[in-house]
Image: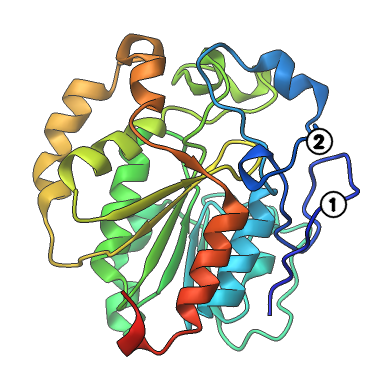
């Protein structure tokens, strides 16, 4: 089982192997953020002070226990190490410095773009239907939207998609043209993907979590037969590609959703997962 601690004595926000009750949304009042976070956070942007996103992702693995996990944007393998079962990992340039296979039975690495991977038909040919996906590839909204469309199309029953970096701290962080080398963190403009999911897919269950440092978006109730996003893709790119968050409206964007406590979300998910399917609502 996963470990839900009441609080942490650690001051630095690092993966610690558990989802702790940290951050003001989970009832904690002491500041645990590195000073630069508060210094770089611009007005109107929410404080993202929950557990490290690697710990939240790891806990999702423990609760959901997917037979197949799909990850886009693996790079060093740090996030992939949270996987407890079979996996498909995709990245155009792996740098697996920290990754070990552990007890996993089957794993597939594809050093290519996610578009090329899905075009290959590998999942269909091998009858693989992932039920947990972490989509953290190219940090541009149209790329993430294509990754979501493709994941949903191939996902198994009750699949969950997890999106990263939809809670930028400032304008430079989300600018499409920012050189990642010039900023401490670069989310790109993937926040727009959350907007289009809300607008075109009201059937989805979308939870925006306070996972440090730039949030996680957990998407449930996927529907492989729904083609609304494919139909609206070109119009989305035309409308949003050059639009900045300041032009869209910082307040307008962050008022579209509530940033939830990762700790409380995990508690609820674990409780639901422990119930027989006939009792779940």
Q: Position of residue 174 (x, y in %)?
A: 49, 22
Res 21 label: none
Image point (81%, 29%), residue name: 34
Residue 254 on image: x %, y %: 41, 26
Residue name at image x 18 percent, y 22 percent: 239
Q: CA distance from mark 1 to mark 2?
A: 9 Å
* SS category of the residue bearing label 1: loop
The residue located at (70%, 57%) in the rendering is 78
10 Å crowding of disc 1: few (<14), some (14-19), many (20+)? some
- Quadrant where the N terminus sits is bottom right
Determine which of the numbered discs, if any, sits on residue 8 in the image: 1
Mark 1 and mark 2 lie on one chain; the one further toward the N terminus is 1
**Residue 62, placed above or below residue 89:** below
Q: Residues within 10 Å of mark 2 (few under 14, many from 20)?
A: some
* Depicted 144 relative to depicted 126: above or below: above
Q: Are marks 1 and 2 in contact (CB under 8 Å)?
A: yes
**Residue labelled with disc 2:** 32
Residue found 49% across the figure and 72% down from its top: 69
């Amino acid at each position: 089982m996963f470990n839900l601690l009441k609080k942490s004595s650690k001051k630095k926000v690092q993966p610690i192997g558990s989802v702790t009750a940290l951050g003001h949304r989970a009832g904690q009042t002491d500041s645990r953020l590195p000073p630069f976070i508060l210094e770089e956070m611009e007005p109107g942007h929410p404080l993202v002070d929950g557990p490290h996103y690697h710990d939240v992702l790891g806990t999702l693995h423990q609760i959901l226990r997917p037979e197949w996990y799909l990850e886009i944007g693996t790079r060093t393998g740090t996030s992939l190490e949270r996987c407890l079962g079979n996996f498909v990992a995709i990245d155009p340039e792996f740098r697996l410095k920290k990754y070990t296979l552990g007890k996993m039975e089957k794993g597939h690495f594809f050093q290519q773009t996610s578009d090329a991977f899905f075009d290959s038909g590998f999942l269909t040919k091998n009858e693989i239907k992932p039920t947990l996906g972490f989509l953290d590839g190219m940090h541009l909204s149209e790329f993430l939207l294509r990754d979501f469309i493709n994941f949903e199309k191939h996902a198994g029953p009750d699949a969950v998609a997890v999106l990263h970096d939809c809670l930028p701290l400032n304008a430079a962080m989300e600018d499409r043209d920012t050189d990642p080398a010039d900023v401490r963190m670069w989310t790109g403009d993937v926040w727009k993907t959350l907007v289009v999911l809300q607008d075109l897919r009201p059937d989805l269950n979308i939870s925006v979590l306070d996972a440090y440092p730039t949030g996680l978006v957990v998407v449930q109730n996927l529907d492989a037969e729904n083609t609304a996003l494919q139909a609206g893709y070109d119009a989305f790119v035309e409308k949003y590609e050059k639009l900045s968050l300041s032009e869209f409206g910082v307040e307008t964007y962050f008022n579209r959703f509530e940033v939830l406590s990762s700790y409380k979300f995990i508690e609820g998910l674990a409780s639901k997962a422990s119930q027989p399917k006939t009792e779940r609502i």
